[in-house]
């Protein structure tokens, strides 16, 4: 199970940049926004490589400053 708090953080970062789910999906070359919707509600999480891309898109230089000192990723 994915982490709801992690999803909330991803959604907040996206909204702070003024991006829609579809805009970010397009930037990531996804076919549709459903994957981002799953991330936003904590249903699933991006893989590590995609997370790094999201940090770049959202302007996050230090992943720990956005997600906390010890992020809780599901396995």
Image: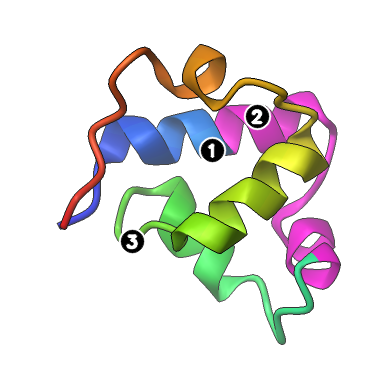
In the rendered structure, which segment of residues is drawn in magenta? 11-27
Mark 1 vs mark 3, CA separation in Å: 11 Å
Please report contact status of discs 2 and 1: CB closer than 8 Å, yes or no. yes
Image point 33% across, 61% down: which residue? 44
Percent of width and height locating residue 73: 25, 43
Q: How is the image coloured?
A: rainbow
- Kindly identify which residue carries mark 1: 10
Residue 25 among those drawn in magenta:
yes
Crowding at dot 1, Cα within 10 Å, few <14 / some 14-19 / many 20+, comes out as many
In the image, 37 versus 2, the foreground residue is 2
Using residue 41 as the reference point, say whether residue 59 is left or right of it. Answer: right
- Kindly identify which residue carries mark 2: 13
Mark 2 vs mark 1, CA separation in Å: 5 Å
Q: Which mark is residue 44?
A: 3
Using residue 4 as the reference point, say whether residue 64 is left or right of it. Answer: right
In the image, 30 versus 19, the foreground residue is 30
Image point 39% across, 15% down: which residue? 68
Using residue 43 as the reference point, say whether residue 46 is left or right of it. Answer: right
Q: Residue farthest to the bottom?
A: 31
């Amino acid at each position: 199970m994915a982490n709801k708090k992690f999803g909330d953080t991803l959604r907040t970062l996206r909204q702070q940049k003024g991006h829609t789910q579809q805009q970010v999906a397009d930037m990531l070359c996804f076919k549709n926004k459903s994957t981002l919707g799953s991330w936003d509600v904590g249903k699933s999480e991006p893989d590590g490589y995609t997370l790094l891309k999201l940090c770049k898109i959202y302007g996050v230089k230090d992943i720990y400053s956005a997600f906390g000192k010890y992020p809780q990723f599901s396995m």
